[in-house]
């Protein structure tokens, strides 16, 4: 049985398909995403002080290497074999060379439900993995047109919220977080449910953009997360991560960005059409990862306890 919050994603997708106006108003989704980022980071920071620095560095370095390999490999595959335009191929590769916070969050919720722990430094690995693949993709695209894209990427809310939350959590510890428990931890799953409801509507809106390219779309939107997750799972086992840590590391590598990547390409290469890349990562890879890949990775890493 899937985590109950995942069914809210399904409800959102169904609502969009039947033409309902069920969705969060205004910037509600962005606000919920920021809340979830801070909650994950605060909890991780409170426990991260106990993590060996060598394990943190090795895991982060491995994640960056895999992200760069995915970016380069997918670019040349789409550009040479699928005959996509250079800029379009780079945009898709950049989306998959970065990471999805929503996928990571949904995976942490499922692991918590199953009672599977994971290394507290993995939110920091998430922050480290967001930028390198995007930077390589922009180089492969043939350079940049803007001058402040790097600042907006590094100083963007995702990285700042994650790193800031980790630092605050590490400074005040578990006892210091106690007054925040009701807001950031007890309400976490309810907020995640609302966020996934909105993502379901947004994912369903993207499916129309995949028409006419179903073979390539399935190869990228499903094949990349599946293969990337399997390879990353082996790397995570080599790194001696816990079972939950193996699943989270693998799903990070398997995920694709649909927030940071489009924003960066709009700033650095305003001539890029990121609609297809976003449709792949949000409309296809996100539901595949949440509904199929997370349960599969849990099974391959040893199965659910009990």
Image (cartoon, rainbow, N blue to C red):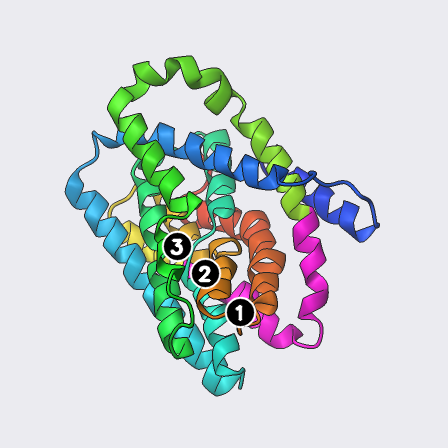
Give the residue drawn at x 55%, y 64%. 222
User: Label 1, on which residue?
Assistant: 220
Q: What is the C-alpha distance between the residues marked 2 and 1?
A: 21 Å
Q: Please, is residue 3 above or below residue 74 in the view?
A: above
Element on which disc 2 rests: helix
Q: Work out whether 158 lies above or below 172.
A: below
Q: Where is residue 296 in the image (x, y as percent from the top left)?
A: 50, 50
The crowding category of the residue bearing disc 1, from other C-alpha atoms within 10 Å (few below 14, some 14 to 19, many at least 20), is many
Q: Is residue 160 left or right of residue 207?
A: left
Indicate which disc, 2 or 1, sits on the residue closer to the N terminus.
Answer: 1
Q: Which of marks 2 and 1 is in front?
A: 2
At x 44%, y 73%, the residue is: 74
Q: Give the range drawn in magenta.
A: 201-229
For mark 2, what is the residue?
264
Circles 2 and 1, Cβ within 8 Å, touching? The answer is no
Whole-percent x and y of residue 226?
48, 61
Q: In which quarter of the image is residue 244?
A: top left
Q: Distance between the residues labelled 3 and 2?
A: 7 Å
Location of residue 152 (image quadrant): bottom left
Quadrant for residue 84, please give it: bottom right
Between the C-alphas of marks 3 and 1, the distance is 24 Å
Task: List the residue tagged with mark 3.
Answer: 153
Q: Is residue 202 magenta?
A: yes
Say which residue appears at 51% left-offset and 69% top-offset: 270
């Amino acid at each position: 049985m899937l985590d109950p919050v995942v069914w809210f994603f399904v409800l959102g997708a169904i609502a969009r398909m039947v033409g309902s106006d069920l969705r969060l108003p205004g910037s509600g989704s962005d606000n919920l995403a920021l809340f979830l980022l801070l909650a994950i980071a605060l909890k991780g920071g409170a426990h991260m002080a106990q993590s060996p620095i060598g394990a943190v560095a090795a895991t982060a370095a491995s994640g960056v290497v895999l992200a760069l390999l995915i970016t380069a490999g997918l670019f040349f595959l789409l550009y040479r074999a699928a005959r996509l335009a250079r800029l379009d191929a780079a945009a898709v590769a950049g989306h998959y060379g970065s990471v999805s916070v929503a996928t990571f969050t949904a995976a942490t919720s499922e692991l918590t439900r199953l009672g599977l722990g994971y290394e507290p430094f993995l939110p920091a690995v998430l922050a480290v993995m967001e930028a390198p693949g995007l930077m390589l993709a922009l180089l492969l695209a043939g350079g940049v047109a803007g001058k402040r894209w790097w600042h907006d990427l590094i100083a963007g809310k995702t990285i700042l919220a994650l790193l800031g939350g980790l630092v605050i959590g590490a400074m005040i510890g578990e006892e210091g977080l106690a007054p925040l428990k009701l807001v950031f931890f007890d309400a976490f799953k309810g907020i995640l449910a609302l966020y996934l409801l909105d993502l379901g509507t947004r994912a369903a809106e993207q499916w129309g953009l995949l028409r006419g390219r179903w073979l390539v779309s399935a190869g990228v939107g499903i094949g990349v997360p599946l293969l990337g997750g399997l390879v990353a799972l082996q790397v995570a086992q080599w790194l001696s991560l816990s079972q939950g840590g193996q699943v989270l590391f693998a799903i990070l590598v398997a995920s694709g960005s649909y927030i940071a990547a489009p924003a960066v390409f709009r700033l650095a290469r305003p001539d890029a059409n990121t609609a297809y890349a976003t449709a792949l990562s949000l409309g296809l890879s996100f539901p595949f990862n949440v509904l199929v890949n997370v349960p599969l990775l849990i099974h391959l890493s040893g199965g659910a306890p009990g």
